[in-house]
Image (cartoon, grey):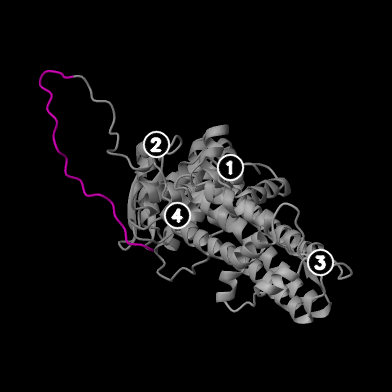
Amino acid sequence: MSDTPHAHPNARPRFGQLWLAESLRLRETLWGPLEDTSEVRRARSEGRNFTERLILRAQYLAQREKLDQLIARWSVASRLTLGGMALIAIFAGIAAALGALGDGTRPVNVNLALAALLGLNTLTFVLWLLSFFISGGGSWLGECWLWLTRKLARGPDVALAPRALVEVLGRNSAMRWLFGTISHGLWTIGLSAMLLTMATVLATRRYSFNWETTLLSPDAFVTLTTVLGWLPSKLGFAMPAEDIIRVSDGLQALPPTAYAYWSSWLIGCVVVYGLVPRAIAMIVSGLMARRKLAAITLDPSLPGYAELRDRLEPFSEHTGIDSPSTPGFQAHVIHQEQPVHRPGQSVLVGIELAPDMVWPPPGFPGHVADLGIIDSRQQRKTLLEHLQACPPGRLLMVCDARQTPDRGTIALLADLGTLSDTPQVVLYTGGGQSSPNETRRVGMWRQRLAAADFQPEQIQNDLRSAIEWLSDTTPVRQEPRP
């Protein structure tokens, strides 16, 4: 799964992305929202509209929370379940053919044989057709596949994947067609195995056929046999003549050719009234399922999505609480050049520095971008969004080591460090002789920065040497980010 779907903003999300987003939505609905400050910031930077930003946020959070691995495991379990059901269908088709024909020691009653071969198949197929007019999907094998996959899948949050799948499939009536494809596919496999078994045993054993009836007259049976055999005969299957049908009552001896006609008639009925309708239904269901799945979209009005609109697609940025009107007060526009930098350019930024510090530091090179000193929460947010949209090359962050490090500052440094391939932190102490307290604070800074995954070589005490490192124009080797 790629980190960012580079697609046109009007392109529909892929089904896997919708499934992942729905799984995350259900999890947050059931167990509360996740902390997503970094993920929302990345989604806002990379997404072009609200839907795409929802997809990006879901991808980043799912990777962090291992939901993508959960869906991958569930998908593997579903394929294994489907493969197992296909094997069962093959064995069921073989068993049905052997049960209907027997071992050849007894005559085959064509009435009972045809009922055994096509009875259940015809009943379920008719019920599937009726399901379009009554409630219910009519594809019990597809529902059985989903139930078995739920039983086989194991792990935390395992119920999220199938529940999210059902939610997504239900938005465009895709579930009916997907389950129909599975059900008709399994029936097609079973009927194919049945026909191969019939052809094999009829070609290797001698079978005799007859019909038996108490209620029906011979004329009725002749008519029924002729009607059933008409369509298969148009496809090239042989059909017994009327005189052969009449004498096949088990009371008279038949020539060997009559048994060949009955064999062809039986195989033709299974093909025409069993295999062909199932194969056509499987193809139609597959095409409809593909069409329905492609038309599914993300519904931003669902609970869990609608609440994110203000954060992912804010109408305007909050600028603070307006002060009350006072006499003589007049606001003025202050024209100030905004700090900008090119992608990959070296960047210098100060983090909560003391007012007496000279900024920018002496020896600051002109080709390096100065983003100023960051003090307020709004400045932190603006800086993170700016660097997210335009990642720097070398990044030097200057901190006042005379202050005690707090978790908010360390978290900001960690977030900034992830946005640069080569970050460094300078623990500025004023340049004079360090007191024991300052030395202790520097040790605390190093300890907390190390806990935030900063390497020792990325933490400096000498601002001058750090500025020289920042001014180096040697290209930075691009390492893939974890």
Q: Residue at x 35, y 40 (%)?
A: 379
Q: Marks 3 and 2: which is nearer the front?
A: 3
Crowding at mark 1 (Cα within 10 Å: few <14, some 14-19, many 20+) = some
Q: Assess whether mark 2 and mark 3 are in contact (beta carbons under 8 angstroms).
A: no
Which residues, given as a range, are shown in magenta? 325-344
Of tags 3 and 4, which is closer to the observer? 3
x 70%, y 48%: residue: 148
Q: Magenta stretch containing residue 333, yes or no? A: yes
Q: Which residue is mark 2?
A: 306
Determine the residue positioned at 59% across, 40% down.
444
Sequence-wise first label, 3 or 2: 3
Residue 473, picture quadrant: bottom left
Read off the residue under disc 4. Answer: 292
Q: Look at the image and tell me whether residue 201 can be seen.
A: yes
The nearer-to-camera label among 2 and 4 is 4
Can you tell which quarter of the image residue 166 is in? top right
Kind of residue sitting beneath label 2:
Ala
- Viewed as shown, does residue 118 lie left or right of 482? right
Marks 1 and 2, how far apart at CA: 20 Å
According to the picture, the residue beneath numbered tag 3 turns out to be 250
Q: Position of residue 414 (x, y in %)?
A: 51, 47
Kind of residue sitting beneath label 3 = Gly
Viewer-nearest of discs 1 and 4: 4
Q: Which residue corresponds to mark 1? A: 163
Identify the image quadrant of the C terminus: bottom right
User: How far apart are labels 1 and 4 at the CA level?
Assistant: 18 Å
Mark 1 or mark 4: which comes first in sequence?
Answer: 1
